[in-house]
Every structure is written in structure tokens, then in C-alpha cells.
Amino acid sequence: MGSTQARKQPKYAEEYDVGDDDHLYSTPNPSSARKYRQPIEHDTLDDPLLQRGAISRRRSHALTTANGASSRAIARPPTEERLVHRRFPLVAILLGMVVMALLAVALSSLTSWWRIHQDDAQYGRPRTFQLDAVVGHNDSAATPTHFIFINLNRHIDIIELPGGDTAHARIYPGPVLFGDGQDLTPVTGEIRDVNGDGKPDIIVHIQDQQLVFINDGTQFRPLRSGEHVNV
């Protein structure tokens, strides 16, 4: 070829001297003193970490079994053992109190049931008490007067059969009892002269109370106010 191609020479960037920029270099300030970090001294006797480690080592040695093998069980701290010992008596006391309360309730119920059972066997239902006596109302030792004391639904009544004759029966009403279970209260009586006139009178017993009916010669009447009797 007749013509030669001229090679293009690449243009390089102008050379740059980095040594001319001072900001690329940082020179530390000269110092003649070196800083040393002194170790902090600890009193090994007061160090809680060392003490805890010593306690742990002592516990681990104490848990060595008889054949020389070490156990992995961790000993319970003394404070927990004291709490367990304190908690056990409290639980025992509470259980004892509950048991005593239950026993008291059971004993009270048993006593009440036994008393009612005894009254049922002796007085029946309704509660009834009977006796015979000579009181001078068309009666005699051969044919005494029959008395019936009855608690009929809390109403106290005294029934007299002069000489045992039901055709001439008399009923003397008594008091009315109030309260739960009073229909099962026994009522009893006795015949005795209480005013000294020589005629037998009626004394009615209801628990700790006493009622008096005075014999006037033909029948009985309630005690009047101001009358003195010896019961």
C-alpha cells in the first residue's frame, strides 16, 4: 500500500506528584510519655466471685459418692432448706386445724343425732309422756286418772281422763314453743301438791321450764299471779 497509516499515540494524563499534597499524610503529635493501664488490685478475701467459686468447689467435693464418682447433683442452698423447714410446720398446723374442725362438726352432729334417737325411743313422735295418779276427780286407786302430756307441732297440751273415763276427758292447753326443732322437744309432768292445800297439782316440765296447774277439786287451772307455790 502506498500510504502508511499513522499510528495514533495514546494521550496519557499528566503525571501527578502525590508528594505535593500534605493532606494525604497525618503526622501524630510527638509524645514522650507512654500510657500504661495498671491492673486493678482486688482483695481475694473480699471478692464475691472468688468466694462463690470456693463455695461451689467445696459443694462439688462434698457431693462425691462413696465409690469415688462425682455426682452432678447441686446442693440446695441453706436458705432454701430453712424455708422448707419453716413451711412444713405451718402446713402441718393448718391441716391439724382443718381436721379438728371437721371432727368437731362430726362430733356435734353425732351427739345431736344420738339425742334425737334416744328421745324417739322414749317419747315417740309426736313427743308424748303419760302417767296415772289419784287426784280426787272421780277416781280411786283402782281407777286412777290418766294424764297425757303431748308436744303436738310445738303446741303443748295436757289431757286428763278422770278415773280413766274418756267420755269426760279434759284438755288443758299449754304454751307454744318457738324455734327450729322445737317440735321434737320432750314434755314431761308430775303430780304433786305445790301449794299445801292437800290436793295434788300438775307440774309440767319443758326443758328447763316448769308450768304449774292448780287442782281446785274438780279440775285444774293455770297458776294465778301472786300465788305462792313450792316446786
Image (spheres, rainbow, N blue to C red):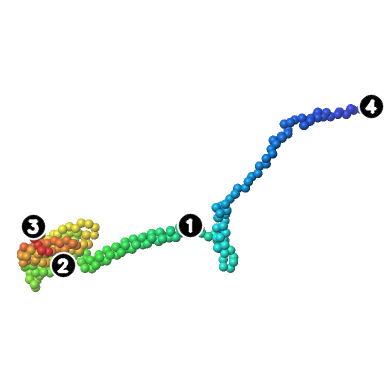
Q: Amino acid at mark 3?
A: Gly
Residue 123 shows up from this direction: yes
Res 126 → quadrant: bottom left
Q: Nearer the viewer, mark 1 or mark 4?
A: 1
The residue where tag 3 is placed is 226
Residue beneath disc 1: 79
Compare residues 55 and 191 and report the one nearer the observer. Answer: 55
Report how far apart the C-alphas of labels 2 and 1 lie in the structure.
75 Å
Q: Are marks 2 and 3 in contact (CB under 8 Å)?
A: no
- Residue 161 showing in the rendered view: no
Give the foreground label among 3 and 4.
3
Of marks 1 and 4, which one's residue comes earlier in the chain? Answer: 4
The quarter of the image holding the C terminus is bottom left
Q: Earlier in the sequence, mark 1 or mark 3?
A: 1
Mark 4: few/some/many CA within 10 Å (<14, 14-19, 20+): few
Q: Amino acid at mark 2?
A: Gln
- Which disc is residue 55 wearing? none
The answer to whether the residues at label 1 and label 4 have Cβ atoms under 8 Å apart is no
